[in-house]
Amino acid sequence: MEQQMTADSLKGSPLLNKASVAGFVQKYAMFVALIFIAILFQFLTDGVLLAPMNVSKLIMQNSYILILAIGMLPCILTGDIDLSVGSVLAVVGAISATMIVSYGMSVPLTVAVCLAFGLLVGAWQGFWIAFVRVPSFIVTLAGMLIFRGMTMVILDGNTLSPFPDSYQFIAQKFLVDIPLFAAIPGSTMIVGALVAALGAYMFIHNYRQKVKYGLPAGTKTMLMVRVAIVVAVTLFAAYWFTQFKGLPLILILLAALIAIYSFITKRSARTGA
């Protein structure tokens, strides 16, 4: 009898539930693959891939792709797509290069003009999609071709440089390059501890909200495991960055964008057809 009860309880256990396993694989397959690839290349490069300096440089060199990916998230969640995002980035870069390098304009003015141009592009394409009901694929495909051509016209096929240090500050500097944080010993670890605490709070808060409204929330044990993993990974990452020059400023910007977009997406609902 006891053996039968044990077997029945194991069948209903999440550990042996095929649906749970399938859901876990579907949800985290990309993360598992990424970890496997990172470990593989860490071995093939004799430890260079995950060296503190290399990790910082990879983040800084690919930060624009991460920012674009964050912006694309709400677009894809609503069932649309934006094929023009790369071309818009290129034409904005061409405008900023022309204003700063060719005409010697100030960095704040250039940034303001580029942001305004990006907003106008988004509003213009959004008008055709939302009000004229042209499929986003068609609108942004046309935009991709238009803005790619604009980039070639503006630059005339040339490369403009150099940019002033103030323009590249966020993309190339570290936390210790800010005098306020340079005067604080272990500033990177302090920021890492704050981020870890915020992450733990968000996990716990979301769990309590799900329990409050009767939504599936999992067990407290799994909650504690997730919190422990987040805190450990965050603190280790902060320590890893201290082995080079500290925390890249662009990573702080990325964290802020992720927090803002997470807040928006979790508290917004799609309406309409």
Image (tube, helix red, strand yellow):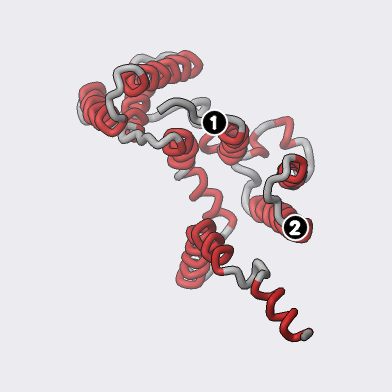
Instruction: Where is residue 30? Give x, y as percent.
Output: 48, 58
Residue nearest the viewer, comparing 248 with 73: 73
Name the residue rendered at 27%, 25% in the picture.
134
Depicted 17 relative to depicted 79: above or below: below
Q: Residues within 10 Å of mark 1 (few under 14, many from 20)?
A: few
Q: Give amino acid for label 2.
A: Thr
Name the residue rendered at 78%, 84% in the picture.
2
Q: Which residue is mark 1?
A: 269
Depicted 87 relative to depicted 63: above or below: above
Q: From the viewer's perspective, tell me whether residue 73 is left or right of residue 228.
A: left
Q: Which residue is mark 2?
A: 219
Callout 2–callout 1 Cβ contact below 8 Å: no
Q: Quadrant of the C terminus?
A: top left
Q: From the viewer's perspective, tell me whether residue 162 is left or right of residue 196.
A: left
Depicted 272 relative to depicted 47: above or below: above
Name the residue rendered at 21%, 27% in the picture.
149
